[in-house]
Structure formats: structure tokens, C-alpha cells
Image: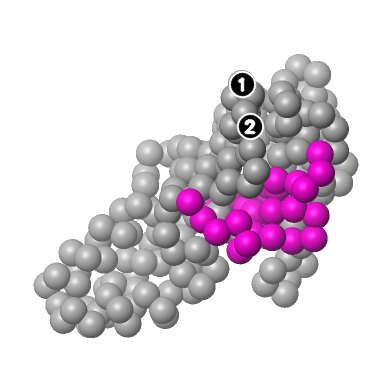
Amino acid sequence: MVPCAVALALLAGCGNDDKGSGTPTSSSAAPSSPAASSSAAPTTTASAAPTSSATAARPPASGPVDPAQYRQQMGYYFQSPSGSFLCAILDQPIDDNAQVGCQGSTAPAPAEFKECWSKNPQGSTLTVGKRSGARCLNQGVFVGAPIDGGSRGGGRVLPYGGVLTVGAFTCDSAENGVTCTNDTTGAGFTIARESNRTF
């Protein structure tokens, strides 16, 4: 009966969205597992981890991740744990201010893209290169190929707390959104469902 409780606790961490709702189900799942295992046999945690489908889909540790796990043809592609944002650090920029970007529905729309973002929410994009900015794209420039045999792209999940660094660029995944920064210039952006900003 204890292994079922541990499995349920692990599965509870799979439903986050990037709204910053203040409900850290992903981070609360990890502490509950050791608590459950301390009152049970020590083998409970070891046997529960490999059976979780979330573990197979995401790198298990927070902090820096291995960029090689995110490598696809034209760069390094990832998606937020909720699947709301599809992002990439490209090998070559599409212009001076767009080597890294995240696409997905976000609000509020900047004035110059208000109509475009409302008609094509998945084209809503924030990018950074030398500087950061907003764009409206009509194709998946920052969308990786499907990795699970399905048709939806996105690349591998960058888990909450995960940090992907390639060259001068770093992207952090958090429950309140994805932040990508040019570590040389300090320019960057944060994108979430109900907020976005460039800096």
C-alpha cells in the first residue's frame, strides 16, 4: 500500500502550468517521497522512481542539465513542463536579436503585436540575441521535432528548476515561466501564460 501512495505523490507533480499559481506541486512531490520512504522500507523510493512515466520524459535533477539531451538538428530545443512554451537555443541566429526564443500563448500582447498575437496565440514569441524583443511568427522557428512518436513538436521537457546553458545563452524553467538570458549582454526575457517581459 505504501508504494501506491508514493506513486500517487509522484504523479501529482505532473500537472503544473506556467502561471506562477503559487502551488508548487512539482517541488512538493520530491519532499513527500522521502517522508513516505522514511516510514517505510528503504527500497520503496528506489523502486518507485523508475516506474514513474514523468521520470522517463524529463531529466530527473534540477539545476544544470546536459545540453546533449536537448540537441536536435539546428540547435537545442525544449518545452516547458506544462507544454505551454516551445523554446530553442539555435546554432545560428535568425537575426541579431533572435538566437533564442520561446513560442506560446502569453498575455498581455505588446501594442505592435496585439492583433497578431490574438489571431495566432502559438505565434506569440519572445526572443533574445544581442537584445531581446517580441515577435509574431507564422511557423515553428523555435519548435523542436517530436520526440515521443507523436506529431506535436517541442523537444524534451526542461523540468522546473532545470537550467540549460549553451554558449552565451541560459534558459531557466520555473513554475512562474521560462527565462532566457544572453549571459554576455544581460538581455533576456521571461514568458508565462499570464505575463511576459523583456529586459
Q: Give the range drawn in magenta.
A: 64-93
Above-or-below relation of 58 to 115: below
Residue 62 visible within the image: yes
**Residue drawn 80% across the image and 54% down it:** 74
Circle nearer the viewer, 2 or 1: 2
- Helix, strand, or loop for circle 1? loop
Position of residue 109 measured from the top left corner of the image (x, y, whole percent):
71, 25
Residue 125 visible within the image: no
Circle 2 is placed at which residue position?
Answer: 182
Measured in 3D between alpha carbons, the distance from the residue under mark 2 to the one under mark 1, in whole angstroms, is 10 Å
Side (left or right) of 112 relative to 131: right
Q: State which quarter of the image contains the N terminus.
A: bottom left
**Residue drawn 19% across the image and 69% down it:** 36
Q: Is 180 covered by the magenta stretch? A: no
- Helix, strand, or loop for circle 2? strand
Circle 1 is placed at which residue position?
Answer: 199
Above-or-below relation of 31 to 164: below
Position of residue 177 measured from the top left corner of the image (x, y, whole percent):
53, 39
Position of residue 19 measured from the top left corner of the image (x, y, whole percent):
51, 39
Position of residue 103 measured from the top left corner of the image (x, y, whole percent):
72, 42
Residue type indicated by callout 1: Phe
**Mark 2 surroundings: few (<14), some (14-19) or many (≥20) residues within 10 A:** many
Residue type indicated by callout 2: Asn
**Mark 1 surroundings: few (<14), some (14-19) or many (≥20) residues within 10 A:** few
